[in-house]
Amino acid sequence: RKTVELAKKNNVKIGAHPSLPDLQGFGRREMKLTSSDLTNTIIYQVGALKAFLDEQDLKLNHIKPHGALYGMASKNENVARAIADAVAIFDVNIFGAANTTHEKIYKYERGLNFVAEFYADLDYDEKGNLIISKGKNKPYDTKLATERSLRALSEKKVRNTGGTDTLVGCD
């Protein structure tokens, strides 16, 4: 409630960031769930936020899967479909990575309002996957992040850890 009230006070759009039910690992560990259980988990989490938004007469702006769920959905069509099933209920934007299963399922198969995002402060591997380090993240180079962002916008590319280019997109 406090977060929603603060967002309202500062005219900040609010989105849900649902994860796998992995409290100990902060949603960063992969889990095997049935499609139905995964959809229900997302509906439950987003629904809780939506109740607080309704109380304040605010709209839910988007949904962006968190942690391992985001990574799993970028590669696994069944996981992406389970997420899409939940997102369709709320009829909001869905954030994900361009040129991955996110875009394939959310945008092209399901016709959801897909918003491609780019991570200027994370590395991409040669397959286009984000590299998320465990533990404490070191501060990133703001000059490099700026260069990466400008290139992602103009060329839709980023240099990956293998020294070649990976296609990216960003809205």
Image: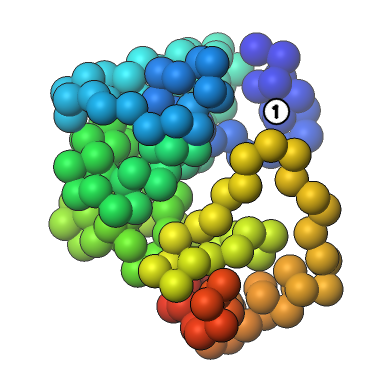
How many labels sit on residues?
A: 1
**36 sits left or right of 160 in the view:** left
**98 sits left or right of 6 in the view:** left
Is any part of residue 60 visible from this angle? Answer: no
In the rendered view of the protein, which quadrant contains the N terminus? top right
Q: Quadrant of residue 149?
A: bottom right
Which of the pair 9/150 is nearer the observer?
150
Is any part of residue 26 visible from this angle? Answer: yes
- Helix, strand or loop at label 1? It is helix
Q: Residues within 10 Å of mark 1 (few under 14, many from 20)?
A: some
Q: Residue at x 22, y 35 (%)?
A: 82
Q: Position of residue 151 (x, y in %)?
A: 62, 83
Q: Position of residue 16 (x, y in %)?
A: 50, 31
Relative vertical location of residue 48 with respect to residue 122 in this rendering, above or below: above
Q: Position of residue 41 (x, y in %)?
A: 32, 19
Q: Residue at x 51, y 15 (%)?
A: 23
Q: Residue at x 39, y 37 (%)?
A: 69
Identity of the amino acid at label 1?
Lys
Q: Specify how the rendered protein is coloured.
A: rainbow
Q: Position of residue 147 (x, y in %)?
A: 73, 79
Residue placed under numbered mark 1 in the picture: 8
Q: Residue at x 74, y 69 (%)?
A: 145
Which of the pair 97/106 is nearer the observer?
97
Which of the pair 74/88 is nearer the observer?
74
Q: Quadrant of residue 34?
A: top left
